[in-house]
Image: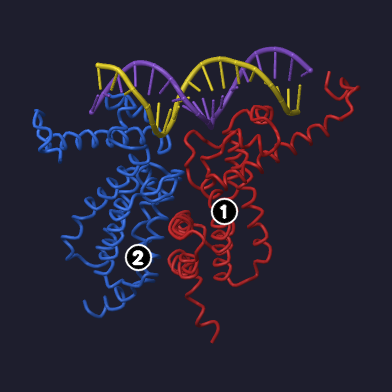
Chain colours: A blue, B red, C yellow, D purple
Amino acid sequence: MNSQTENTRSPVRPDRRAARRQETKAEIVAAGWELVRANGLAGLAMRDLGERVGMKAQSIYSYFASKHEIYDAMFQEGYAAFTAFTGGLLENSNAEPLDQARSMAHQFFQFCTSDPVRYQLLFQRTIPGFVPSDESFAVALGVYESMATQLADLDISDPAAMDLWTAMLTGLTDQQISNDPGGQRWERLIDRAVDMTLREIAPHLFETSKGRNS
Amino acid sequence: MNSQTENTRSPVRPDRRAARRQETKAEIVAAGWELVRANGLAGLAMRDLGERVGMKAQSIYSYFASKHEIYDAMFQEGYAAFTAFTGGLLENSNAEPLDQARSMAHQFFQFCTSDPVRYQLLFQRTIPGFVPSDESFAVALGVYESMATQLADLDISDPAAMDLWTAMLTGLTDQQISNDPGGQRWERLIDRAVDMTLREIAPHLFETSKGRNS
DNA sequence: GTCTATAATCTGATAGAC
DNA sequence: GTCTATCAGATTATAGAC
């Protein structure tokens, strides 16, 4: 009754067929990113998408049931990219706590500003009917958890402290994207912002530095 | 040759006619706000707009050349509302500098979170082809200037300091709107955020407070 | 100034042949 | 799985009657 025993005449084994299918889906999502970067997040049209992957728009529905499902795949891919992007940072964490925090901030800022449309999809709610699937939402939650873990390494575990931290980070990012795209006006302020925030949420990182070293 | 001397038969004087026209335009813009709050910023349809003001959608083109022109009027009105909203604050400025700064922050936060769609139109770039007209842009600039003036009252004049201030404010606001709409999760952090920011950009507000009062 | 009528185009999505 | 054909609807915008 399952497809493996049923399709004995097929020249392509099911796992290969599934692999090809996944390849095509990935190709469609990649084309989605290209289009969205060119025309804005809301400017994604199934016809353009089809043209880009060499298919009629209607054929895409063999791979994705709706346009929102494509957005969802992009959403998930975006958060996976974030995890991959910041994952390496967790390894070499024998740096000074302050430098570590600065590094985290720069990484986040870099990731967001390097692709404003992705930022819009991942961190802002701008597509009318789009709600991430449970699966995608789980991936997104993982990012926040890993961020919390990073802060916990600096002995920052208060939820309010983390909220202040994220507000500061997204504030810089948002201003950079909205008011000086491509520039460095807010990027230059990251270290100052990190310092002042840590002084508020993690004063223990500062108070003993003088007595210990001299 | 001008219309005043020419239209002697008209029962409505030109200035009254112009006034009525302005009234209708204002009515259309008001309907635009209602629709946008109900359907999202991107969900503004000319049909709905016409229905709301008791006109066919096409008749709106007698008042606005395009949909973007309506967005532009809303954009301008939004910034004007902000000026009106914060204008009163400038008057009674014999409060403590720190309280004054906190007050400014709360005002901004309140204005933004009380109408998220307006915030989206005014402070984020989310409508595909929309670029504010020169006139609207001038109104928007005025807001930033009046903000700069408020900060100058606290002896904060460094441009980088103002950028840190706005990043902090928009960060709190953005997080509140995106991640806890209707709640107070980031609103509760305003005073802490203001304090830590001022400690960084305006240390002179803190250093003498102990010696002077005792 | 507002209407009807209509243009021309784009939208996401479906049915069914091959 | 990809195609053709097509749907049902929305979009902005124009022309011309009243």
Pinpoint residue C11: horizontal percent, then vertical percent.
44, 30
Q: State which mark lies toward you, 2 or 1.
A: 1
Is residue A211 rendered to the left or right of residue A67? left
Which label is found at residue A109?
none
Pinpoint residue A2: horizontal percent, then vertical percent.
15, 41
Mark 2 touches mark 1? (CB < 8 Å):
no
Question: Relative to B9, does residue B150 appear above or below in the rendering?
Answer: below
Instruction: Identify the residue under disc 2.
Output: A195
Q: Residue at x 64, y 51 (%)?
A: B81
Mark 1 Cα shell of 10 Å, populated few (<14), some (14-19), many (≥20): few
Local secondary structure at mark 1: loop
Return the residue found at the far front: A1
Q: Nearer the viewer, residue A196 or A160?
A: A160
Q: Residue at x 44, y 50 (%)?
A: A175
Pinpoint residue B36: horizontal percent, then vertical percent.
57, 44
Which image quarter: residue A92? bottom left
Return the residue found at the far bottom: B214
Question: Relative to A161, does residue C13 appear above or below in the rendering?
Answer: above
Local secondary structure at mark 2: helix
Which label is found at residue B115?
1
> Which chain's residue wears label 2?
A
Q: Amino acid at mark 1?
A: Asp
Q: Residue at x 19, y 60 (%)?
A: A90
Q: Quadrant of the C terminus of chain B?
A: bottom right
Marks 2 and 1 belong to one chain: no
Question: Relative to A191, does residue B13 appear above or below in the rendering?
Answer: above
Q: Amino acid at mark 2?
A: Asp
> Which chain's residue wears label 1?
B
Q: Quadrant of the N terminus of chain B?
A: top right
Count of numbered labels shown in the rendering:
2
Rounded to the nearest angstrom, the CA distance separating label 2 from label 1 is 32 Å
Which image quarter: residue A38? top left
